[in-house]
Amino acid sequence: MSVKVLYFAGLREAMGRSADSVNLPVDVTTAGGLRDWLAGQHEAIRMAKNLRVAVNQKMVGLDAPVADGDEVAFFPPVTGG
């Protein structure tokens, strides 16, 4: 299964890029599983706290399914004023 992963805000800066295309292991089937798998490979994701996630531009929980061809976006909470 292949998905496009987008990184936003400080996570994008920490990763040094805004996106990746990744081929997932068969046991990665949820947004949370994808986050955990990516955290095993990238310190920036491992160190990020409270990441929000969207699948195909819709905010979802970590238990949301991820399917072949999906676009999954991760971003840290941000504040403004």
Image (cartoon, rainbow, N blue to C red):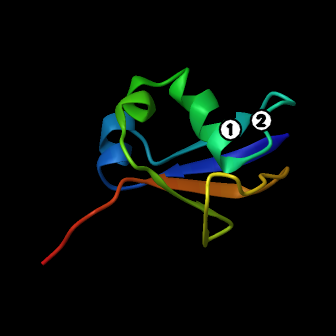
- Residue pictured at 33% horizontal, 59% vertical: 77
For the C terminus, the image quarter is bottom left
Q: Position of residue 8 (x, y in %)?
A: 40, 55
C-alpha distance separating marks 1 and 2: 5 Å
What number is the disc on residue 24? none
Q: Which residue is mark 2?
A: 28
Residue at the spot 63% in from the left edge and 55% down from the top edge: 72
Q: Position of residue 74 (x, y in %)?
A: 50, 52
Q: Which quarter of the figure has residue 65? A: bottom right
- Dot 1 and dot 2 residues touching (CB under 8 Å): yes
Q: Residue furthest bottom?
A: 81
Secondary structure of the residue carrying tag 2 is loop
Q: Is residue 37 above or below residue 33?
A: above
| Amino acid carrying mark 2 in the image | Val
From this viewpoint, which residue is outermost toward the left? Answer: 81
Query: Which residue, given by chain and number where applicable, does mark 1 sit on?
Result: 33
Against 57, is 51 above or below? above
